[in-house]
């Protein structure tokens, strides 16, 4: 289970909203491909991206200017393409759908089509956007509900004075295997590292980063990568940064879009240990 | 209830002790089943006692709360921030993908994986479904009678228990879909 | 106690909540340590509140009891036989957290509690480790030569016996697990 992404989602979009797309990426900045995958993952899919574009401009979902939205959507797609990322098929499918709607709207309308919503691709798209937004909001509401492990603590008591041999729990080995898979899935990159015992350790790298943040208050994101270590080294550094950010031990900041990211230590919260 | 059963207040103490001792929420049936066959209290009697216990704890730091699979004692929300200080580790966060998937299952159940993909507009990974099955938040409840007979997923009581809910009706209301009436003059 | 601290009865509720939330008995020091530095109550103040809680629970099914390592709520002796009936009913179900812990010990041994927490990404309660020690599925096998000299846990022969394994080599290899996970078949 991946937790909330620490990367700011504005990265590719400020460029678009300013009205002109970026021609090329700054050459001096090495961005590990994983980082961009994560930017892409900020959106849950084409519907989410479209909703973002619509809501960002306070547009009425029932009356979206298809031309404008299509144009923005395409710009996003092209930037992602420029970064040489593989775009999920769903995004391309949506691009095709938008292009189709656009072309239909540009054609003179036949009189009998005005009334019938049924096969109007706009109607279908709007309905899907509405349904997706409804679920998106519901998921946010669900996330706010008080829940176990975060808001609810059970009141427990000691029962060791009770004299009975509790029947012992029955466990099958596959339960253990299932459980282990859960752990692997949850922490996949990290556990991959732990289990295969690679020489590069995310934990060591985390310590290293925290150490360098003790001597200097701000470190450039790119300075944390040593290209000589190759791909694995870059990935380990990157994971270490993500882990630290997730643990709220560091802060990743960016002065302006596509400026170099810089890392600083967060003031540690005094954590309780019992 | 037979005459062998302890007097009223003692009966209340037994129910209270059982609710405190149990690892998981206890339903009226489960509480009933603890008593010997001839002394089984009626559910109504247990319910009365539970209501009394609820009011006993009104001024305390804990409360008897009803979730989908029964009653459990839990620390009141007002004390949650203090209790959180006891635990050094941060609670797990769930990804949007997972929350959206479980929301679709909860609100539209029973649904197939295809239904979820249709609403979210992206494919749903096998991992995601198995995470939800592992957590016992969802289960397979039959198959849809279409080609391929895809599994139909529904939420479980454990899902409701986890989110402190007694039933699906207690979930936040789903917003109404605005009526769609595409006018001819719709903006291009 | 500074003026910032909640009023008396609220302070009592906080202590009560902490005692209910904790897995293990809590000493006065441990209770003290929960409060922010400038608001730390004196031990005497905590003791006064504990005495008050003790008398609050006099008529209930549980009591606040002092053991060597601190204070804990426990079921009263009079209700113990009923709780025994509850426990005798059905074998408990191990939590996911406990299964994950034993899985990590089995595959990564020897490991410290810290190693387990790092892999799981969440804290491992003392209860969980002692359940596994009680069950004789794991044992302490030396200490890691790092500050604090944490215990190193390994699985036991009883663990292998229970799962009908002749040796640790009989456990499915991790690579196989991944393949099985992808295939979604868990017929182990």
Image (spheres, coloured by chain):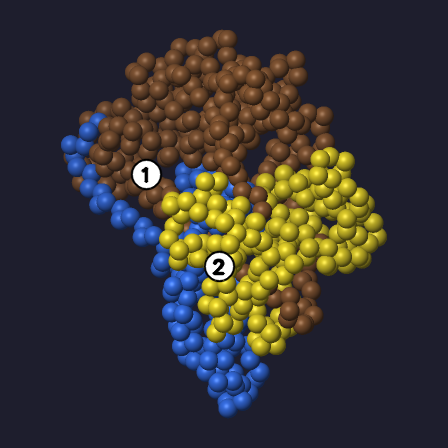
Chain colours: A brown, B blue, C yellow
Task: Identify the residue at image location x=19%, y=29%.
Answer: B187
Q: Which residue is mark 2?
A: C48
To which chain does the residue with label 1 belong?
A: A
Closer to viewer: mark 2 or mark 1: 2
Q: Residue furthest bottom?
A: B3
- Asked where in the image residue A12 lies, by quadrant, the reply is top left
Do the CB atoms of the residues marked 2 and 1 lie less than 8 Å apart? no
Q: Which residue is mark 1?
A: A129
- Residue A55 shows in this picture: yes
Task: Residue C95 in the image: state x and y as whole percent.
Answer: 60, 55
Q: Nearer the viewer, residue C108 or C81?
A: C81
Task: Identify the residue at image location x=40%, y=61%.
Answer: B167
To which chain does the residue with label 2 belong?
A: C
Marker count (numbered): 2
> Distance from label 2 to label 1 (Cα)?
60 Å
Q: Nearer the viewer, residue A118 or C21?
A: C21
């Amino acid at each position: 289970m991946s937790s909330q992404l620490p990367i700011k989602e504005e990265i590719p979009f400020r460029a678009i909203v300013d009205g002109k797309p970026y021609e090329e990426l700054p050459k001096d900045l090495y961005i590990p491909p994983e980082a961009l995958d994560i930017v892409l993952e900020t959106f849950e899919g084409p519907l989410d991206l479209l909703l973002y574009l619509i809501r960002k401009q306070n547009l009425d979902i029932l009356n979206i200017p298809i031309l404008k939205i299509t144009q923005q959507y395409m710009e996003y797609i092209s930037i992602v393409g420029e970064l040489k990322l593989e775009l999920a098929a769903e995004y391309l499918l949506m691009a095709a759908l938008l292009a189709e709607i656009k072309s239909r709207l540009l054609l003179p309308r036949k009189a009998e089509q005005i009334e019938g919503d049924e096969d109007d691709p706009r109607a279908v798209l709007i309905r899907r956007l509405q349904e997706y937004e409804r679920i998106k909001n519901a998921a946010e509401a669900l996330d706010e509900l008080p829940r176990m492990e975060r808001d609810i603590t059970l009141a427990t008591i000691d029962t060791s004075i009770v004299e009975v041999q509790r029947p012992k729990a029955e466990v099958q080995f596959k339960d253990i295997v299932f459980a282990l898979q859960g752990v692997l899935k949850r922490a996949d990159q990290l556990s991959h590292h732990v289990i295969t015992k690679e020489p590069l350790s995310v934990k060591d790298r985390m310590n290293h980063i925290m150490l360098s943040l003790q001597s200097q208050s701000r470190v450039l994101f790119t300075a944390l990568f040593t290209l000589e270590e190759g791909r694995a080294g870059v990935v380990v550094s990157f994971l270490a940064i993500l882990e630290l950010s997730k643990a709220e031990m560091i802060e990743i900041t960016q002065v302006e879009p596509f400026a170099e990211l810089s890392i600083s230590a967060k003031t540690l919260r005094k954590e309780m240990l019992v | 209830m037979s005459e062998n059963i302890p007097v009223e207040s003692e009966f209340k103490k037994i129910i209270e002790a059982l609710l405190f001792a149990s690892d998981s929420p206890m339903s009226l049936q489960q509480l009933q089943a603890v008593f010997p066959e001839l002394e089984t209290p009626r559910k109504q009697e247990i319910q009365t006692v539970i209501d009394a216990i609820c009011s006993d704890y009104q001024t305390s730091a804990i409360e008897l709360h009803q979730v989908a699979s029964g009653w459990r004692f839990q620390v009141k929300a007002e004390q949650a921030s203090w209790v959180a200080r006891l635990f050094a580790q941060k609670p797990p966060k769930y990804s949007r993908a997972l929350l959206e998937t479980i929301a679709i299952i909860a609100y539209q159940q029973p649904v197939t994986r295809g239904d979820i993909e249709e609403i979210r507009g992206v494919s749903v990974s096998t991992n995601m479904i198995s995470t939800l099955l592992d957590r016992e938040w969802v289960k397979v409840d039959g198959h849809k009678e279409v080609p391929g007979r895809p599994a139909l997923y529904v939420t479980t009581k454990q899902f409701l228990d986890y989110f402190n809910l007694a039933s699906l009706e207690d979930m936040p209301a789903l917003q109404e879909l605005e009526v769609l009436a595409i006018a001819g003059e719709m903006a291009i």
